[in-house]
Amino acid sequence: MAFLEIRNVAKSFGGLMANNDISFSVEQGEIIGLIGPNGAGKTTLFNCIAGFYPPTRGKIFFAGEDITGLAPEKICLKGVARTFQIVRIFKDMTVLDNVMIGAFCRTNSTSRARAKAEEILDFVGLTDVQFQISAGLTLAGKKRMEFAKALATEPNLIMLDEAMAGLNPSETRDAVELVKRMRQKGLTVLLVEHVMEAVMPISDRVVVLDYGVKIAEDKPENIVTNEEVIKAYLGEKVHVARQ
Ligand SMILES: Nc1ncnc2c1ncn2[C@@H]1O[C@H](COP(=O)(O)OP(=O)(O)OP(=O)(O)O)[C@@H](O)[C@H]1O
Ligand SMILES: [Mg+2]
């Protein structure tokens, strides 16, 4: 069985099928891009995997276990972390305290949570601002802190929901480097992203959703020439050459 297996997952909101019979699998250490137009169902699929919604149908297996419909905190303990499309931070707290919240998923000890948070802040390059109130961070800083909060839960799979949206080109390059370093640490990464210049060069494979349905799954170089994907989504996004 693959590290992560999505089997025939469907999620409906009333009459709307936000995810419709989606299947794909991910091997450990892979970076998988998940792309598609607005409303295609990308965030919904993250929510199903992370336990925020139970899927209406289908099964999700992670590291050999059926995790379908488990509560988010249980799924987190099994090693799945995610970031949010709209950054969710405790804005009145320091950067360090925000990241410690993630670390408390594995320990009740404040000193151990702090040590873990410090290690992760160093990894993401936020040590210098760790005592700042997080509301004062730039958008790039806040997104980086979200990475840190997720990493502090010690995941094996991290799901990043539009981690690069709104960043300038140099901040985007930094974020891409960070994703590469996550993989070097042994993490498996699922990446929802509209920034094709970022997602195509780092993804081993790309899954494309459209109206809740998987319309393609292939290597990036094949995705960018796939007629159906171009029609549904890529359209004018032509600068997608692999680095
Ligand atoms: N909690 C909800 N209740 C009702 N409808 C929802 C809910 N969450 C998502 N939807 C709908 O499900 C569909 C898929 O939404 P989703 O947020 O998964 O898309 P997405 O691919 O992440 O889009 P975007 O690129 O804009 O973030 C949309 O039509 C959306 O309006
Ligand atoms: Mg979304």
Image (cartoon, grey):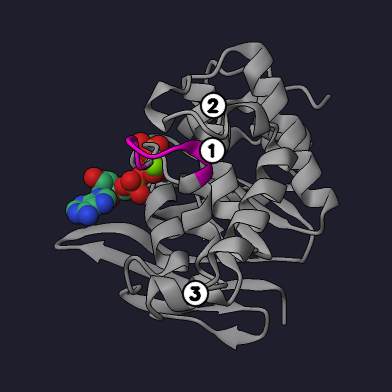
Mark yes or no: residue 25 visible.
yes
Residue pushed farthest left? 14
Q: Is residue 82 found inside the magenta-colored segment of the image?
A: no
Please state which of the two labelled residues, at mark 1 or mark 3, is closer to the viewer. Answer: 1
Residue at 57%, 79% (x, y): give it: 61
Q: Are marks 2 and 1 in contact (CB under 8 Å)?
A: yes
Mark 2 vs mark 1, CA separation in Å: 6 Å
Of helix, strand and loop, which mostly describes the magenta segment? loop
Give residue 145's mark: 1
Residue 34 image point, x, y percent: 57, 46
Q: Earlier in the sequence, mark 3 or mark 2?
A: 3
- Amino acid, disc 3: Ile
User: Was residue 94 drawn as part of the magenta stretch in this picture?
Assistant: yes
Distance between mark 3 and mark 2 Cα atoms: 26 Å
Query: In this image, 99 relative to 196: left or right?
Result: left
Could you tell me which residue is drawn at 71 percent across and 24 percent down? Answer: 174
Work out how far the residue at label 1 is from the one at label 3, CA to CA, in angstroms: 21 Å
Q: Is residue 37 above or below residue 14?
A: above
Residue 139 as seen in the image, left or right of residue 237: left
Residue depicted at x 75% and y 48% = 182
**Observer-nearest of 44 and 108:** 108
The x, y position of residue 31, in whole percent, is: 72, 50
Say which mark, if any, is on residue 141: 2
Q: Nearer the viewer, residue 131 or 194?
A: 131
The reply to whether residue 34 is visible in this rendering is no
Query: Which label belongs to residue 75?
Result: 3
Q: Which residues are magenta?
A: 90-96
In this rendering, the answer to whether 175 lies above or below 115 is above
Residues 157 and 137: in front is 137
